[in-house]
Image (spheres, rainbow, N blue to C red):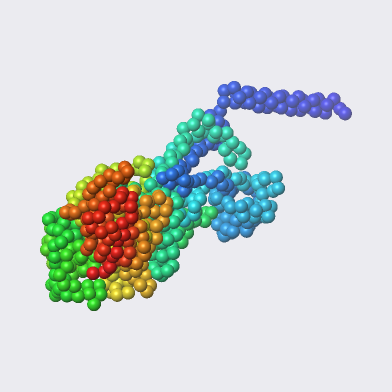
Amino acid sequence: MSTVKYDGMRRRFIAMTVVCTLAAVAVLGRAAYIQLIGDPRLDSLAKKQFSSKVLMKPRRGMIQDRNGEPLAVNLEIQSLAANPAKIRNRNTLARLLAKAMDLPLHRVEEKLKGKREFVWIKRHLSDADMGKLKRWGILDASGDLTPGLWMVAESRRVYPHGELAAHVLGSTNLDSEGLEGVELWGNSLLEGQFASVNAVRDALGRPAFLDASGAAEVKNGDNVRLALDASLQFAVERELKDSLQKTGARAGTVIVMNAVNGEILSLANEPSFNPNGNPNGARSGALAAHRNRAFTDGFEPGSILKPVLLASALQRGHKLTDKIYGEKGSIVIQGKRIREAEAHEKFEWMTLKHMIKISSNVGAAKLALKLGPDAYLESLKQFGFGSESGSGFPGEISGLVPPRRRWHPLTLANIGFGHGILVTPIQMLRSYAAFFNGGWLVQPTLVTTQMPRNKALPPVRILSQKAADDVVDALVAVTEHEGTGINAGIQGYQVAGKTGTAQMVDPTTGRYSHSRYVASFVGSAIGVEPKLVIFTALEEPKGAYYGSEIAAPLFRSVLAAAANRFSLPSQPLVIKDKLLLTRAKPVAEPEESQAEAIPTTIQDGVIQWKLPSLAGLTLREAVRLLRGRDFQIEARGSGLIQSQIPEPNKAIKEGALLRLQLSEP
């Protein structure tokens, strides 16, 4: 090799060495600069790639019944997510995911397009979904997913009792946000407090480390407690379903409420739905099945409004013994004929009490005309008709009371017997509670927890004690011999209530239908605690449609369920010709009487009483008259008392047996 060539190679080697050395020094210098001083641009890129803000969701509060029974809880569940930017063979994976998750291929392909770092594939996976992921090789035996996919732990709302109280509870969406019912109403309480937390992500974009101090700001949701009793609710729903099957009715509603404090112990509607929906959160059943008819549906009440008319009259000085002429079954007002429910009913003179017992339309129309529009409209407003009940339940309507300018004589007469006015079931129940609690209008209470947009209002007196007692007296007569509500009677309890059968408006013709009815009954058991008032209604039954034939028996079944649940003390009375025993304990304040059992002597420490004559009284009147004396009463027959043993003026020991024979007059 020549000297010239060697020198050239040597110079090139030295030059390359110098260049490489300088490059290495530059790289080392840049690295040292980045490590010691830093580069804002690179810092920003790193933060974007590995740091993020994560919204931490709190645990949603439970919904419980009055005894703490969980009705809505949370279930930890997995959802499948993807980072499309980290997926290599998107087309192949899209086909696998579409088959495994039963999703349209085009939807999966759309999700995996672009360079997004997060996208949901499917929320709330079921056990079957997890099995399919393994079957299609997306999830291996060790639990690892195909690169670019990962599982996200979520919380799913679950209703452990299925349909139980569904219309009260409501439901949530996939993100556990309330859609309806208490879930919507109390959403701000139930959802808790969210927090935005700093997080470090791994190579797939999954949060790996969270800021502990930020996570501490998350506040779990509060529990919400209902006034409902789950055990009674179950029994009531069963009775309502059974009644719909028997009657073929299209829909039905039952409500049980404490007449004194307004707490709703049970509320059931049919048709119903399962708030659990499906694993992906879709609502189950038709949307109509989700309506809480007790608050959101109005209807013309028919004859169950007549006691409100009676209360208005009594409050203004009328008496139960006042008489009104029944016009032998029909009356013409403004050219329109008002008739009794049955053509054979040719009533003439009747007392106001008897008018309620036989449910006379003509009598109610004439009494309304006698009261006048101003007085009756004022009473309806006082009872809460035409305005929301104050319950706070989402979607509650106010019903409709015609404005005063439209109260023509025919309007007044029709409203007198329950047509031409729109009410809700909760409004009707609330009005009857005023009869049974001594004249107080109470606020219906579904939730005992303090709820948003709901202010508890104190009871308001709307009737005198005497007026309320007189209405109850008339309602008791409804369930006794020849009353329209005799089928509501239950052995062991004295029942007061009223039947209703209202024609529905045909949406096609705009006229009252002769084939579509709402049958109803509202009432209570007298003399027991707690004072429970019960509303029952069946819409568009097939076959029998009178409230006395289908709604009253449903009331009886619900009352029996409530009596069993709360161990209501029975006071057996006579029903037809059955032999029943009762003790002479007061059912209500005794009516004025010139005779009563008075003490005569004390023998061996036992008081003996001198009996008055009970002939001509009803069994109820006799029980009242004896004013709590500790006698056992054996009654046979029905109607009025004809004879008694011991005879009048004879002595009877406290706790002894008094035999009464009754027969129809």
Q: Residue at x 40, y 69 (%)?
A: 247
Q: Quadrant of residue 66?
A: top left
Where is the C terminus found, in terms of image quarters?
Answer: bottom left
Q: Residue at x 58, y 52 (%)?
A: 126
Q: Residue furthest front?
A: 604
235 displayed left or right of 608: right
Q: Residue 7: x percent and y percent?
A: 81, 25
Q: Quadrant of residue 485?
A: bottom left
321 displayed left or right of 512: left
98 displayed left or right of 235: right
Q: Residue at x 56, y 28 (%)?
A: 39
Of residue 400 and residue 550, the one placed in the foreground of this image is 550
Q: Residue at x 63, y 51 (%)?
A: 130
Q: Residue 119: x percent and y percent?
A: 55, 48
Question: How many marks do you count on the picture?
Answer: 0
Of residue 290 and residue 154, the one placed in the foreground of this image is 290
Q: Residue 595: x percent and y percent?
A: 19, 54
Of residue 491 and residue 352, the one placed in the foreground of this image is 491
Q: Residue 25: x percent and y percent?
A: 67, 23
Residue 551 in sight from this viewpoint? no
Residue 100 in sight from this viewpoint? yes
192 displayed left or right of 256: right
Q: Residue furthest right?
A: 1
Where is the N terminus found, in terms of image quarters?
Answer: top right
Of residue 592 and residue 118, the one placed in the foreground of this image is 592
